[in-house]
Amino acid sequence: MKFDPLLAVMNPRNIPECMDSLRALPIRRAWLQRYTEYQLQSVIASIVEDETIAFTHLGLVSDDVIVSPEALAAVLEVARDHEVATGYCRLDSTHPLVNVTKRRVKDPEPSRQAYHFYSYDEAQAQGRTFRTGFVGFAVTFMPRELWRRFPFTVYGDAYHSFSSDYSLSYRLGAAGVPMFCARDGYVEHVKAEWNSLRDAHDAATPERRLLVGHEPAGIVVEVE
């Protein structure tokens, strides 16, 4: 069976160490530049529906993580065998918990109480592939057809949108679609503070500031 992955980078910033790692990955990328999370709903849908863009599996990754080739390879190995495959990261740069969960998220709306996160040590103690009830776009792949069934959506509105990862995870779990994590798909999250849209550190760091509205938005899909 053909396996032709495309990695879409949700790219509202230009964090040097993250961008360097993403550019160095041995995979074709689509750069979704300077969009809000709300705008990405139509952007990602357009990529999924555009048959001129060749891929069998579309992956999503945030632009505030450092991804090694080894981590990507681990996730792709899982994606060859399972419809939903993900890597994972700490909730912020030093947090003891990671963004995969021990059970599915069952609440229709996201909240702190809705998650049952693994700790980093617990995740590292799992088998090479293990079940999760949440995928956090720290390199998350699904086949094109599954993206059609479960499109990228957000909570909120055009002025305040959030939790697209929770939206997808909730809908997959409710439909009984299993999600799998690659133990060796760990990526480094540079965010300074979990559950903060723009924590004080990022707001005060020029290379981490959001460029949405300051630079043109656009899609750049790399050729073979």
Image (cartoon, helix red, strand yellow):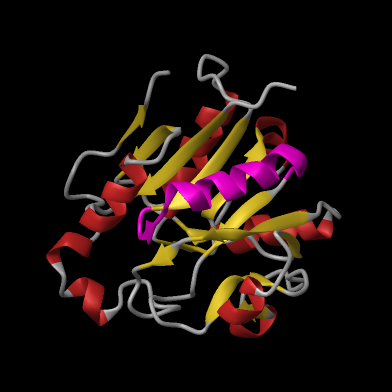
Asked if residue 206 is positioned above or below residue 86 in the image, the reply reads below
Instruction: List x then y, in percent, for residue 99.
Output: 57, 70
Furthest residue in direction right, as rendered: 176
> Observer-nearest residue: 43 or 202?
202
- Residue at the spot x=60%, y=49% of the render? 75
- Residue at the spot x=52%, y=14% of the render? 52
Q: Is residue 53 visible?
A: yes
Look at the image and give the residue range highlighted in magenta: 63-83
> Observer-nearest residue: 188 or 207?
188
- Residue at the spot x=62%, y=64% of the render? 166
Q: Is residue 221 left or right of residue 41?
A: left
* Quadrant containing the N terminus in the rendered view: top right
Name the magenta segment's main secondary structure. Answer: helix
Q: Is residue 38 visible?
A: no
Q: How many marks?
A: 0
Furthest residue in direction top, as rendered: 52
**Residue 168 lies within the magenta run:** no
